[in-house]
Amino acid sequence: MENRNKSSFHTHLLVFFSLAFAWSWGCWLLSSAVKTQLPSVAGMLFLAGGFGPSLAAIAVVRYVGGRDGLRDWLVRCLQWRVGWRWLALVFFLPLAVMVLAAAAHIALGGTMVPSPAIGHVLLAVVNFVLVLLIGGPLGEEFGWRGYALPALQARYDWRVASLILGAVWGVWHLPLFYIADTAQSYIPFSLFMASTLALSILFAWLFNRTGGSVLPVLVLHTAVNAWSWVIPGMIMREGSSLRPYGLAVGLLVLIALGLLRDAETPITMRKT
């Protein structure tokens, strides 16, 4: 029975990762292929690619647990009674990290361009909403943290599970490094991987601390991506300095190392 459960665990997780990668990489590659001839279609395909993890999770949970299993999983993911303090913390933590990194960059003699949000507060608010809906969080987090993390935590310590998932999460972004004008196309892959590993630890800690709700993780992921647009130097452009981004990643790594000392009881999915 134990061997069967272990085999089932690996099979379901492998199917999830395979579906997530196939959908996302397929959409992104098709987007690049038709970008010149069909730019509107290419844009839609590119955005659709970001939904691979969440769609894969829904498919696997529905297949394994049926409608009841899918409903129970969604109820757990959408727990909303997590406390406003958690939501405030995760919303402003990325801002604090980025501001400190930007300040350190200036203190070291660097310069910063003005924030694009200056004089465009409404645009910044709209940007947060768009980031949540189509900029990564909604398309990814039901998969990475909603399904894969608790599945991995059923077999491994939460620290190991978060590092495994962080590595997979980083590799999932790989095609974006070869697509012109994406944020990833201006960042060394090694530095980006360091950020996904550190963020994966932070996301896993938050997920477990808030009872397995995906909502705080959605807020955190949205804050990371959206504040990157507000704070200069966090989204790379051709010719821009890597130092502000590198300093922010360094701060995230320090936070992650501190969280690794926590022996928090993980949230698991034992029926995977």
Image: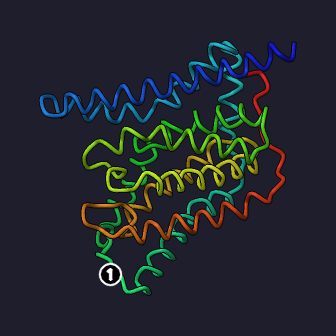
Residue located farthest toward the right when viewing the structure as drawn: 1
Residue depicted at 32% across the width and 50% down the height = 185
Depth check: give the residue in front, 210 or 197. 197
User: Callout 1: 10 Å neighbours few (<14), some, many (20+)?
Assistant: some
* Residue positioned most to the left: 37
- Asked if residue 38 is positioned above or below residue 262 in the image, the reply reads above
Q: Quarter of the image containing the C terminus? A: top right
Say which residue label 1 marks: 111
Residue displayed at 44% across by 62% down: 227
Left or right of 223? Residue 258 is right
Position of residue 18 relative to residue 64, above or below, is below
Quadrant location, the N terminus: top right
Report the residue at 26% width, 35% height from top: 43
Question: Seen in the image, is 179 located left or right of residue 167?
Answer: left
- Residue 106 vs residue 75, the one in the foreground: 106
Amino acid type, callout 1: Thr
Name the spot of residue 265 as percent of width and height, x first. Answer: 84, 46
- 42 and 242: which is toward the camera: 242
Residue drawn where x is 45% and y is 32% of the image: 51
